[in-house]
Image (spheres, helix red, strand yellow):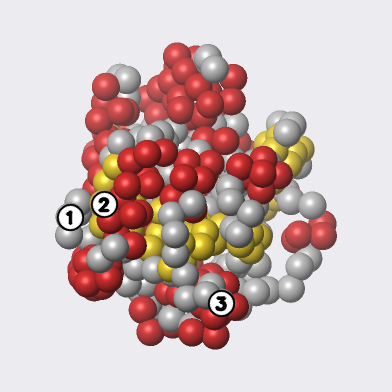
Amino acid sequence: MRVVIVTESFPPDVNGVAHCAVQTARHLVRRGHEPLVIAPAVPAAMQEAPAGPDGLSIDPCPVVRVPSIPLPGYPQVRVALPSRRLAASLAAHRADVVHLASPFVLGIRGMAAAAKLRIPAVAVYQTDLGGYARTYVGAGEAAAWRRIRSVHKAADRTLAPSSAAVRDLVGHGVPRVQLWPRGVDTERFRPDLRDHELRSSLAPGGELLVGYIGRLAPEKHVDLLAAAGEIPGVRLVVVGDGPSEPGLRTALPGTTHFLGRRTGDELARIFASLDMFVHTGPYETFCQTVQEAMASGVPVVAPAAGGPLDLVDHGRTGLLVAPRDAGAVRDAVRSLVADPALRAEYGKAGRTAVEGRTWEAVGDRLLRHYAEVIAARTAVAA
């Protein structure tokens, strides 16, 4: 099968869209298929950086880079510019199916090119653009959904990562929506990587490590951790980078450790060394870091909204709290701080819950979606 993956982000970018796109490309190669990735160009210094221990800077297949510019105020995000390279590459690859990863700018152009060439397309919904519109401009949610509908209605099938995302899409008039969750690398993220030397360096007084791992951006609401960080015996650990970092260094307790961007085996070691993982973002369509914490045997606190509703079994693998409620986050953390046995129980149950959610299993489900879309388009043509 010849597949063109048109993605708004791809490694060396570090985010959910890039991670899912590269895992998809890798799986296609492993299964003997022929993927081609089309993605925004990144600065030369990033593109030529040596591979990290996770190998994410090594492309698993041919990658066509389309000219791009940094998003104003958020340079870590690249926006693709109009280019004939996309349509030419799509046609030259003789694709059987086009995979649109979180389509918004480049993906819309990819959808138009696929339609012109009469190639079936699968659109993967991954970003709550309506929530982002509320966060960044305080308006524009309706316009964001109009844009989402326009591209997803044109696709042969839309794949949503969680039950909440399915409901949102259907409720906003998007047709042909099916569930396709995300995998997790249970060999990389595992409990036995707990590093006592790392823990001693981060919590020399024996404090419990409460961590957030992800982008530091307004929609993540990481400042909700401030009250939890004031609990006696707690030390906050923040991993990631983004435009909110300067403000968070002021908002969070002075004892907070900001470790910057970490990836691969180093990231897995940090996950496993936490005593609990807290995610504060209310707009997650899935929330991959929750799965990685669970695979690491770490209990989770997350908002009762979006993707975490599918991932966290409240009272068994972690705790779900009211979204955007700093007091609820503090109380959940406090309850786990006070109960070591419960932390261990949640961590063990979380690991068990994700052991079957491998990228191989999820990737094979995606291949079935491709095959069904291609077969339906062939039947219509016949």
CA–CA distance in space, label 1 to label 3:
30 Å
- Residue behind mark 1: 315
- Residue behind mark 3: 204
- Is there CB contact under 8 Å for labels 1 and 2? yes
- Residue behind mark 2: 319
- Is there CB contact under 8 Å for labels 1 and 3? no
Marks 1 and 3, the one that precedes in the sequence: 3
Q: Camera-side residue: 353 or 206?
A: 206
- Count of numbered labels shown in the rendering: 3
Q: Camera-side residue: 281 or 66?
A: 281
**The N terminus sits in image quarter:** bottom left
Q: Position of residue 125 (x, y in %)?
A: 40, 38
Q: Position of residue 270 (x, y in %)?
A: 51, 72
**The C terminus sits in image quarter:** top left
Q: Please name the residue shown 27% across and 71% down the image.
A: 340
Say what amino acid the circle numbered 2 marks. Answer: Leu
Say what amino acid the circle numbered 3 marks. Answer: Pro
Q: Residues within 10 Å of mark 3 (few under 14, many from 20)?
A: few
The quadrant where residue 165 appears: top left
Q: Please name the residue shown 47% across and 18% down the image.
A: 141
Which of label 1 and label 3 is nearer to you?
Answer: 3
Q: Camera-side residue: 204 or 91?
A: 204
CA–CA distance in space, label 3 to label 2:
27 Å
Label 1: element kind: loop
Quick check: 285 left or right of 244?
Answer: left
Q: Please name the residue shown 82% across and 57% down the image.
A: 44
Marks 3 and 2, the one that precedes in the sequence: 3
Q: Position of residue 365 (x, y in %)?
A: 27, 57
